[in-house]
Image (cartoon, rainbow, N blue to C red):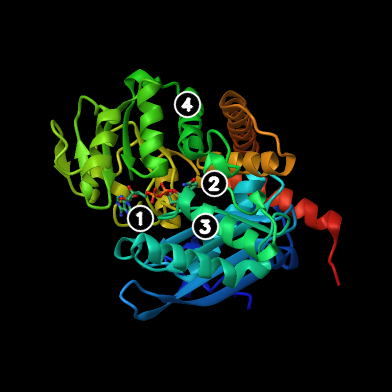
Amino acid sequence: MSTGSAVASATERDEFNPFLAMAERFETAADHLGLDAGVREVLRTPDRELTVSCPIQMDDGTLRVFKGYRVQHNFLRGPCKGGIRFAPDVHLDEVRALAAWMTWKCSVVSLPFGGGKGGVICDPRQLSQAELERLTRRYTASIMDILGPDRDVPAPDMNTNEQTMAWIMDTYSMHVRKTTTAIVTGKPLSLGGSRGRTEATGRGVMLACREALKKLGMRPESSRVVVQGSGNVGGIGAMLLHREGYKVVSISDMYGAIYNENGLDIPAVLRWLKEHKALEGFPGAKQLDNDEQLALDCDVLVPAATENQITSQNVHRIQAKLIVEGANGPTTAPADKALEERGVMVVPDILANAGGVTVSYFEWVQDRMGYFWTEDIVNSRLEQTMVSSFNEVDSVATKYGVSMRTAAYILAIGRVAEVYRLRGVFA
Ligand code: NAD
């Protein structure tokens, strides 16, 4: 285990390095808060980074070794919380950034958690279900010394889902010799999952969009929305926006986008996607590539796919008046500055997509109580959290005269710094 160096010199900065992007936003907020150098170093440095090698027997009998990571960024406000992703391009800096974002996200919405994140370098599309199960179980066993309901609680992220969480829960439970449902969130309902968890991130995006629209004096019925990504966040977010009366004119997946200026029938699009495994060919829609989609004339853009999508290279072509970040880190720091200068409102990831971790928190609470809530209770508590957090960030933005992003970081980092001041340095 090692800790990573947090901030490189300006000349080493790389627009597409998510950890440096996070660190740059951290420094801006820390300047506003007047944090001293020592506290900054403590707060931006990950507490623990674990790298593991997972040997897996493939279906054809050969052996392969997959590399996995778990980064625990900060424990000051409670156990670490954060997803696990399976993807070919997972790397440590990305996992570090995602873990730090989770610390700030949990703090923005006042959850009693720190931030963690995990990833395994693999291409899940090339693996059978049996291989995925063996990989998930071995990865869990390899990192389980640092997991636990009071230590670190994983959840799904890109290319992991309820089934992955069920395997993690089972593997952990078999090792500790008792069923421990609170070890992961995003589980199936029958294993201690929460009602409303699958839709939670998309629902949070829809609520953040609603609050931002009110501030801009815009109405859902006259707002054209472009959604990048059609997975858990993008697909469900688009569906809920469609239900609220927004005109979703375009949605994409990793292969490309579909567009209809009169609005897409999102339930039909999602049925098509389920059946054909791609959006391509959806009747009555024009096919676009992913770059063209981001440049569409629209009112609201919801990047809900992956990081580094709105960059210094394409920011000048973005036409949306409002960006609601469903994905983590979809806008690079230079692009952010350009959007701010142009007066484009950005509801930042650590606020806009916090619905997922909020209902994950509800799931963890329900598992520990052994008492489960109705979907209405979950949804209304989520709405309360999203609306009050949006208003708190908005007040900080007004008080400091900064963007919603900088305000969210000021709020989040200020809360963690306050806990650090009260707890003091353990030695
Ligand atoms: P997912 O795997 O369910 O879906 C990802 C979607 O993005 C798919 O439709 C995929 O085809 C598409 N995609 C991938 N690369 C793309 C590209 N370059 N251009 C266009 N589309 C592309 O993942 P998800 O859970 O929806 O997560 C999406 C983002 O939201 C990630 O950044 C994740 O960290 C973040 N997030 C997820 C949750 C959650 O609860 N699932 C919570 C908070 C944040």
Q: Nearer the viewer, mark 2 or mark 1?
A: 2
Label 3 neighbourhood size at 10 Å, few (<14), some (14-19), many (20+)? some
- Counting from the top left corner in percent of width and height, residue 161 is at 45, 50
Q: CA distance from mark 4 to mark 1?
A: 25 Å
Q: Amino acid at mark 1?
A: Thr
Q: Secondary structure at mark 1?
A: loop
Task: From the image, tell me which residue sits under label 4.
Answer: 210
Asked if disc 4 is less than 8 Å from ligand 1, the answer is: no
Q: Amino acid at mark 2?
A: Lys
Q: Amino acid at mark 4?
A: Arg
Task: From the image, tell me which residue sits under label 2.
Answer: 187
Label 1 neighbourhood size at 10 Å, few (<14), some (14-19), many (20+)? some
Query: Residue shown at 28%/39% (left/top)?
Result: 251
- State the quadrant of the C terminus: bottom right
- Counting from the top left corner in percent of width and height, residue 421 is at 82, 56
User: Between disc 4 and disc 3, whose residue precedes?
Assistant: 3
Asked if disc 2 is less than 8 Å from ligand 1, the answer is: no
Q: Quadrant of residue 111?
A: top right
Query: Residue shown at 61%/37% (left/top)?
Result: 393
Q: CA distance from mark 2 to mark 3?
A: 9 Å
Task: From the image, tell me which residue sits under label 3.
Answer: 167
Relative height, residue 395 to residue 214 (above, below):
below
